[in-house]
Image: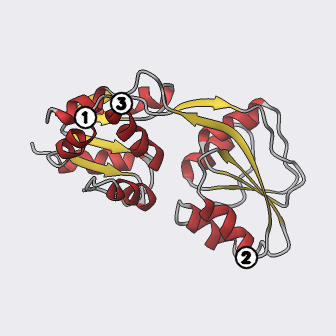
Amino acid sequence: MKVAVFRPADERIEQATELLESLGVEPVADPMLAIESTGAVPRADAEYTILTSKTGVEIVADAGWEPDGSVCAIGTATADALRAAGYQVDRVPDEFSSAGLVAHLAEDVPGARVEVARSDHGSAVLTDGLAEHGAYVHETILYELARPPDAGRSTELAASGDLGAALFTSSLTVEHFLDTAADRGIREAAITGLEGAVVGAIGEPTRLTAAAAGIGVDVVPSEASFEALARETAERLPG
């Protein structure tokens, strides 16, 4: 059973492939994201600094960034990366999402300087939500997310009905999947092909992006992590 995974072409795609193999399926590694650092560094004087990804943590750590205030992580994966890099993690929301982080910080940020350090495709839910609660929000774009030129193997498998499952880990992976299919002239065929596959989306925003494009989502994991996404999707595959 072929399962498409779209993580960036670094240790994440390798770890994802190993996990899928351990679950007894055949991984189709088709990275849909290429990471390009901007060279920017977050301000250090914010009362709260928010990191939203392992990639962002690696970039700030390599730059020698040292924050003065509290460090917030959007989820456990980011928090683990921060601790591994030697940072203290002060806040992690119960719900691993932009909306969850806004709710978690809502009572503390009025009048506070909040630094949001992330990719160029970050959700406005986070920055707008914090501003609505009275925070002075500054955003630093640490890296840009591009579509790799060689992406798209999975779209051909989907279009031919040979894909058992697809694991979408962000709205951008959905968009890039569709763009690569369109470049090949098989966009509608790929969407139709996914109707016969088990489609997993890592969270509600990703599910909504897929649904808006006509892709039905079968699995949204109970925890917003790739491992949970992979395991819960694999459980839905026919034996």
The answer to the question of whether label 2 and label 1 lie on touching residues, with beta carbons closer than 8 A, is no
Separation of marks 2 and 1 at Cα, in angstroms: 45 Å
- Is residue 5 toward the left or the right of residue 10 in the image? left
Q: Quadrant of residue 136?
A: bottom right
Q: Residue at x 68, y 43 (%)?
A: 83
Task: Give the residue type at disc 3.
Answer: Asp
Q: Which residue is mark 1?
A: 186
What percent of the width, then of the height, locates residue 181?
32, 34
Mark whose residue sits in front, 2 or 3: 3
Task: Give the residue type at disc 1.
Answer: Ile
Mark 1, other Cα within 10 Å: few <14 / some 14–19 / many ≥20 = some
Mark 3, other Cα within 10 Å: few <14 / some 14–19 / many ≥20 = few
Q: Which residue is mark 3?
A: 183
Q: Provide the secondary structure element on which disc 1 rests.
A: loop
Q: Quadrant of residue 114?
A: bottom right
Separation of marks 3 and 1 at Cα, in angstroms: 8 Å
Q: Residue at x 40, y 52 (%)?
A: 202
